[in-house]
Amino acid sequence: MSAPTITTATRPDPSAPGAALTQRRSRPGDLAFRLAMQACLVIAFAVLASLLAWVLIKGWNRLDSRLWTEMPTGLVSRLDGAGVQSALTGTLWIVGLVAVICLPVGVFSAIYLEEYADNTRWYNRLLELNIQNLAGVPSIIFGILGLGIIARALGLGFTVITAAIVLSLLVLPVVIIATREAIRAVPQSIRQASYALGATKWQTVSRQVLPAAVPGIATGAILALSRAIGEAAPLIVLGAVTFITFNPDGLDSPYTALPIQIYTFIGRSQAGYTELAAGAIVLLLGIVLVMNSIAIFVRNRFEKRW
């Protein structure tokens, strides 16, 4: 009986004519593409770093407690003691209401579409199509619709609740899409094991699926709120007042926001307003950075690998 023949795989010889020709053909293109991507990355970071550096240098003298404890002013002689307290308070009011309105609606809508909706029904397919399309609608369109329907037709006026409703509609598709992706990432075996133990549909969703999807849901929600906090176009259409020397005290109160206040400061020619605008930009970036850091912490803290 003859011994079995054992074959071993060997790497192709780099000195072979065919291999050398393949390497010569692929290497220049790969190198050029890699250099192009690195150049784009360097240019993007250089522009971003230059803008951040300009803002920090320009607003360094205004980065103190006066920035968030003092009210804005329209008088040049009082710029040294001016701040953006009313704009900061209005921004916190709006973002808080957006979270209260948008997050429950977005999460429960995603649960329905992902766990309960029958995709063979035409109205469910139409709903999904509209949600995906709304995610790409420009924010100014939401401002115009809010002006015509919410502010005027419903009679809510140019108030905090109007701004919160419009911005909730703006970021609602983001919350729904992010929540659906987080729910979809939970393995089907988790659901099947829950059903095998006699759990109902809602018990499976509420006690197994949602806790496992918390990292993705929280990340999407905070990123959606980060987008809402920096929107200016809808608020301009909705009549956000540029100079307010008092903080909002209710849902029907006039308001202003940091993006509107920054836009107003930059439009003035005096150097003091430019410094105040730069300080407000740093404050707004700090808030967004804190929110994004919370999203990263939540994702890393509760993330599960299946």
Image (cartoon, grey):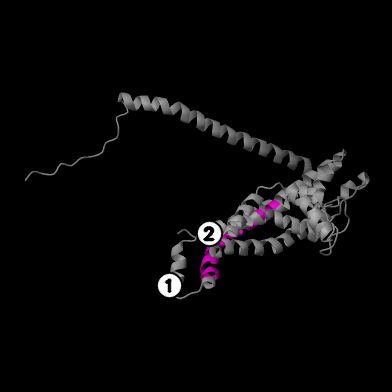
Task: Pick whichever, 267 or 119, lies toward us.
Answer: 119
Q: In this image, 78 relative to 142: left or right?
A: right
Magenta residue span: 204-227
Contact between marks 1 and 2 (CB within 8 A): the answer is no
| Label 2 residue SS | loop
Question: In which quadrant of the rendered image does the C terminus lie?
Answer: bottom left
Asked where in the image residue 248 lies, by quadrant, the reply is bottom right
* Residue 215 horizontal/vertical position (percent): 56, 60
* Distance of label 1 from label 2 (alpha carbons): 26 Å
Residue 291 visible to an observer of this rendering: no
Indicate whether residue 212 is drawn in magenta.
Answer: yes
Residue 168 in picture, x, y percent from top left: 71, 57
Q: Which residue is drawn at 69% across and 36% down?
A: 50
Q: Judge whether 113 appears above or below 60 on screen.
A: below
Residue type marked 1: Ala
Going from N to C along the chain, the mark reached first, 1 or 2, is 2
Visible residue check, residue 149: yes
Q: Any magenta on residue 179?
A: no
Q: Using the image, tell me which numbered label, if any, was put on residue 196.
A: 1
Marker disc for residue 120: 2
Relative depth, front residue between 67 and 173: 173
Q: Which residue is at a point 77% across and 60% down the rendered structure image?
A: 93
Q: In this view, does 20 lie above or below 79?
A: above
Label 2 is placed on what type of residue? Thr
